[in-house]
Amino acid sequence: MTATSAPLPVPAIGAPLPTYLVTALDGEQVAAYAAASGDRNPIHLDEDAARAAGLPGTIVHGMLIMGQFEAALRGWRPECRIETMQTRFLRPLAVGGGLRIEGRVAKIETEAPLRLIVRLMVRDGAGTPICVGDARVGL
């Protein structure tokens, strides 16, 4: 016999997600992402190239940042199915920088299957917003 847990209650509009912290996205992680994704743009990997492009140094791939949304959402509701995501990047994150993902339930779509629109914000270690987005998740 296996134990089953009761489903989690449907959150209310405005309900916050727990804050999800990433201590740092370091050069090794960025290099591994570049190799896996094929995005070897030098602004992510080469300090001189990043500075020549007008940046203060190398920056984390936007899609690597966006990929952290899944961990944040699954930390909140492990059973959720991410159906769509829309993201707007406000400013770059320096390689080695940490981030904090915050979110709240923005909308509930009650027709079966139940879906939520979750509004997410990513802040850097100083608390400056770097990315905002919406995820449509099924429960």
Image (cartoon, rainbow, N blue to C red):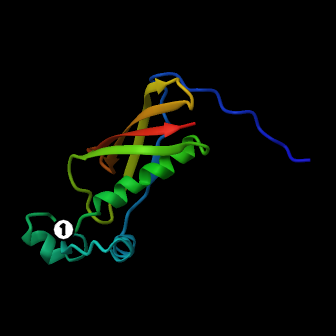
Q: Residues within 10 Å of mark 1 (few under 14, many from 20)?
A: some
Q: Residue at x 77, y 38 (%)?
A: 5
Give the total of numbered labels. Answer: 1
Q: Nearer the viewer, residue 60 or 82?
A: 82
Quarter that holds the C terminus: top right
Q: Quadrant of residue 48?
A: bottom left
Image x and y of residue 102, in percent: 41, 39
- Position in image of residue 14 (x %, y %): 44, 23
Secondary structure under tag 1 reads loop
Q: Residue at x 37, y 64 (%)?
A: 25
Which residue ends up furthest to the front in the rendered image? Answer: 112
Residue placed most toward the observer, 35 or 21:
35
Which residue is the site of mark 1? 57
131 to 94, vertically: above or below: above
Viewed as shown, does residue 137 lie left or right of 93?
Answer: right
Rendering coords of residue 22 (x, y %): 44, 55
Whether residue 22 sits left or right of residue 91 in the image: it is right
Asked where in the image residue 97 lies, by quadrant, the reply is bottom left
- Percent across and percent down for residue 112 are 56, 28
Q: Residue furthest right?
A: 1
Q: Quadrant of residue 64?
A: bottom left
Residue sitting at x 31%, y 50%: 124
Residue kind at label 1, given as amino acid type: Gly
